[in-house]
Image (cartoon, rainbow, N blue to C red):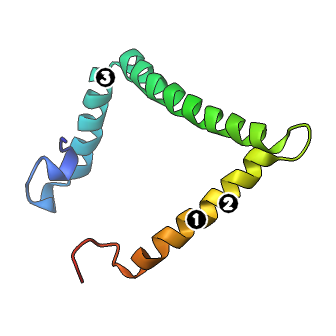
Amino acid sequence: MTLVGDAAHLMSPFAGEGANLALIDGADLAREIDVETALSRYEKMMFARGAKSAAASQRGLDMMFVKGPPRKLILFFKAMGVAAKVAKPFARIPASGKGE
């Protein structure tokens, strides 16, 4: 984490320099950011995340659109029913984890 503008330059507001320093700090910081490296790292994460979601979506399609009865889809909903029954006693436990 880093600070810019008023947060980085503690001074009296009477000179009116906080906003000016924030703009200069922001411009300096922007010039130092390697956009190609940042975009490359972002895209690597984004494509991996997207591939996982696309695979999950494909599995859903494969369950629903089949010749004959959708057995996998039926098994999926039966399993969800079992999971809901198993999880029901835990529904009364607070989500905060503080034991309230």
Label 2 close to label 3 by CB (< 8 Å): no
Q: Which residue is mark 3?
A: 31
Q: Which residue is mark 2?
A: 78
Q: Which of 51/25 is in front?
A: 51
Q: Which of 43/21 is in front?
A: 43
Q: Position of residue 72 (x, y in %)?
A: 74, 45
Considering the numbered disc 1 on the image, is that residue within a helix, a strand or a loop? helix
Q: Is residue 17 visible?
A: no
Q: Which of 28/99 is in front?
A: 99
Which residue shows up at 83% across the image and 47% down it?
70
Around disc 3, counting alpha carbons within 10 Å, would you say few (fewer than 14), some (14 to 19), or many (20 or more)? few
Task: Choose top left, top right, bottom left or bottom right for residue 81.
Answer: bottom right
Seen in the picture, residue 88 relative to 79 is either above or below; the reply is below
Which residue shows up at 58% across the image and 65% down it?
82
Label 2 close to label 1 by CB (< 8 Å): yes
Which residue shows up at 19% across the image and 42% down it?
1
Q: Position of residue 88 (x, y in %)?
A: 48, 76
Q: Is residue 37 visible?
A: yes
Q: Is residue 23 left or right of residue 56?
A: left
* Callout 1 amino acid: Val
Report how far apart the C-alphas of labels 3 and 1 lie in the structure: 56 Å
Considering the numbered disc 2 on the image, is that residue within a helix, a strand or a loop? helix
Report how far apart the C-alphas of labels 2 and 3 lie in the structure: 56 Å
Q: Position of residue 33 (x, y in %)?
A: 31, 23
Q: Which residue is mark 1?
A: 82
